[in-house]
Structures are given as structure tokens and as C-alpha cells.
Amino acid sequence: MKNEYSFIKNGDNIMPIPSGSNYILTAGKVYELHNTQMDTPCLSEVSDFIFPEDYYLSEADEKFMDKIVNTYNKTDKLTTGVLFSGLKGSGKTLMAKKTAMKSGLPIIVVNGSVHAADIESFFAQVSDDVCIIMDELDKNWYLPALLGFFDGVKPTCKKLILCTANEEKEINTYLNDRCSRIRYKRVFKSIDKNVAKTVLMKYFDTDEAADGAAEFCCASMSVVSYDNVVVFGEEHQNNPESSFDEILNDLNIARK
């Protein structure tokens, strides 16, 4: 009688070979690690990253990202961790995505629904070098369960792990001052007037007008983030007859 299946043996477990075809992860392509209906993590191809037209990176930002990629390329360590933390809406996730693109690696964005224990187990089965993005690390995962993943307790692929977090107090004990887990860290604070002006140039007719708007934002907003400055510029563009005070009064932005 002809066997219906071909089998594989994993430890003491013997199981049919899953159906499908071989797949090689593509450099620069974005994938999402998520759970199937059976609560098993798997990858799916997703759309490439899209960045706002007015997204601004300083020379220092570019050098920081280049340093991360250069270190990853030179190290023989399996894990190179990076933490982008601080102000909400400040561009942490955008910078993580830009860094991922600079790496030239397959990019895997971990969905917050994937259990911490499953993340380590999944990547222990991956042989490709990859860039992993874990957005809102402080909210989505119980960090102690991820320490083995960062420490490389189980052999895994070589990985560049880019994490974002709003509240460092949730992760201080486990990640800060531990370069073996997080080698580089960038803390995002309120953007300065020059950056705000650069963003606002898209929404104002003259350099002088953009400069005045940037000065108002930095003097009046309690949180001068990239997101808030963009929205302020959009509101001016949509309501040019409104004063800066009137625009800010109607927005969900507290004053200083």
C-alpha cells in the first residue's frame, strides 16, 4: 500500500510534511509575524512602508541609523538590539522603519498578538538574517518572557531587533544599561524650532510665516511632537482665516 504522506521527525515527534512550496525571505521586503486561527505564529507578506512626504530626518539621525546598520554588519553576535523611546507621536516608529530599510534585510514586524514565548520559538527555526520590529514593546509583551530571546538563550538567526516604547519605566529594570540586549538607544523628546519649521514649510507660503508658526508651536504646545506639528500645519492650511490661538484651542493638544 502506497503511503499517503511523507513524514518528518522532530525529536520524538513524527509528523507529515506540511504542504506548500519552499520560500526564501526577500531582502527589503516587509512581513508580519502574526497568529493563525490555530494560535500558531506565521509570516504573511504585507505592503511596503509608506512615509509622509514631510517626514524629516536630521544629519544626526542619518548617522545614528548608519551606525546601527554598520555595527550589525560587522558583529558576529546573533542579537543587535535598538530602543527608540520617549515622546508619543515623535516619529519613533518611522525611524525604526527607516533603519530597517537601511539594513537591507528581510523585515519582520511582530504583531502584538503573538505571545512572547512563541517569538523566541519561531525565530529559533529561522536561518535567514532578519530585521525585526517590535512596536510598543512596553504595551504589547510581558518583557521578562522575552529576555531569553534578547540574550540568545536558544540559538536563533542573526537578528537586528528594533524596539519602540513610550514608557521606559516599564522596561528600565530589564533593558537599560544592558548593551548585550539593547546596544543603542535614542530618546525622543519635543522637537526643536528648526525641525518644526522644516516640517511646517509645506503648509506656509513663506519662510518667515513658517518660522513664526514654529515659534508659536514651541512656545504654546505642551507636546511639540512631529505628529502635533504636522496636524497644526494641516489645520492652518485648511483654515487660513483662523489665528494660531484659535487653531490650537480646537486641537487635542494641551497648552504649556
Image (spheres, grey):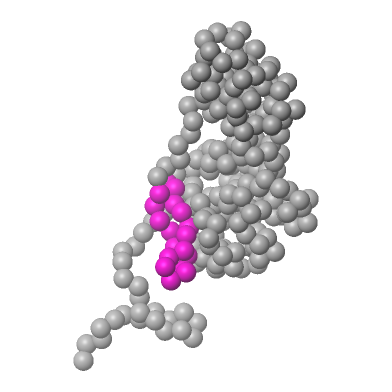
Q: Specify the farthest residue to the left.
A: 1
Viewer-proximal residue, 211 or 176? 211
204 left or right of 5?
A: right
Q: Position of residue 70 (x, y in %)?
A: 60, 41
Viewer-proximal residue, 240 or 97? 240
Which quarter of the picture shows residue 189?
top right
* Identity of the residue drawn at 49% across and 43% down: 104
Task: Report if residue 35 lies within the magenta region.
Answer: yes
* Identity of the residue drawn at 64% across and 13% down: 211
Which quarter of the picture shows residue 49?
top left
Q: Specify the farthest residue to the bottom.
A: 1
* Identity of the residue drawn at 64% across and 39% down: 88
Vertical position of residue 205 compared to residue 12: above or below = above
Q: Position of residue 135 (x, y in %)?
A: 58, 49
Say if residue 14 shows up in the picture. yes
Q: Position of residue 180 (x, y in %)?
A: 71, 54
Identify the image quadrant of the N terminus. Answer: bottom left
Viewer-proximal residue, 245 or 20? 245
Q: Position of residue 218 (x, y in %)?
A: 70, 22
Say if residue 67 shows up in the picture. no
Residue bounds of the magenta highlight: 29-46
Task: Report if residue 179 lies within the magenta region.
Answer: no
168 left or right of 252?
A: right
Identify the image quadrant of the C terminus. Answer: top right
Magenta span main SS: strand
* Identity of the residue drawn at 62% across and 17% down: 244
Vertical position of residue 38 compared to residue 82: above or below = below
